[in-house]
Amino acid sequence: VGDILRYPILEDLAPLLTSSTLTHDQSMVEGEVNLTPIQHYFFESDVIVDKHHYNQSAQLSSKARLDKNILSQSFEALVKHHDALRLRYYEASGEMVQYNLDYKAGKNTVHFYDLSNETDWQAQLDTLCEALQSSFDLSEGNLFQMAHFQLPESDHLVFIAHHLIIDGVSWR
């Protein structure tokens, strides 16, 4: 980080780069995982009233129709690869426990909605998105959800993630 701040121009920074052959274990993480300091703060704080509903969303649109099978396969691969997307939380002996569920034990599905024949599709889309965001349950999961909306002239993808699995800076 110090070099990046000292040499903000890539041409000046390039001579300092070195090659690394360090590899990291990419096997699936399952079981109990220690809470991070910010996660401890989240559970101990009274600032956030509804801890289940503390999530963020992003919506993408496509003029081309999206293939449901490819979306489902992509979502499953994403959840399988990123362990944090399978986290669950429960209380034990007065402490919050973070548990990484086995991939096959989760409900890793895309929500599909066909609103292509609806006249007030925007209101229905808003209602459905609010319902999805309100459906989060820390002990049951899924803390990352994807919804596909087929609209009259486009398709929309909505991604919803709880702040426990991704912070606002990384989300952007």
Image: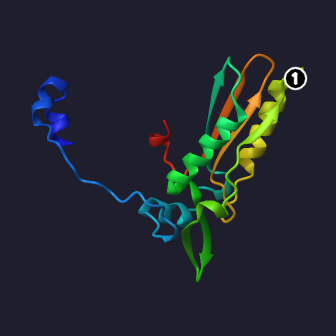
Q: Position of residue 8 (x, y in %)?
A: 19, 28
Q: Is residue 84 above or below residue 97?
A: above
| Colour approach in the figure | rainbow
Q: Position of residue 105 (x, y in %)?
A: 66, 64
Residue under the point 79% across and 31% down: 125
Q: Position of residue 123 (x, y in %)?
A: 83, 28
Q: Quadrant of the N terminus?
A: top left
Viewer-nearest residue: 162 or 101: 101
* Residue at the outermost left position: 15
Judge whether 56 appears above or below 125 on screen.
Answer: below
Left or right of 125 on screen, residue 91: left
| Residue 114 in sight here | yes
Mark 1 = which residue?
Answer: 120
Picture layout, residue 149 above or below residue 91: above
Residue 9 visible, this orientation:
no
- Whether residue 23 sits left or right of residue 48 in the image: it is left
- Residue reaching furthest bottom? 93
Q: How many marks?
A: 1
* Residue placed most toward the observer, 164 or 142: 142
Image point 89% across, 24% down: which residue? 118
Depth check, front residue: 71 or 115 = 71
Q: Amino acid at mark 1?
A: Asp
Left or right of residue 169, residue 48 in this image = right
Q: Tell me where residue 81 appears, x and y as whole percent.
A: 50, 52
Q: Residue at x 50, y 40 (%)?
A: 171
Mark 1 burial class by Cα count in 10 Å: few <14, some 14-19, many 20+: few
| Residue drawn at the location 42% of the way across and 63% of the way down | 37
Residue at disc 1, secondary structure: loop
As drawn, is 19 to the left or to the right of 58? Answer: left
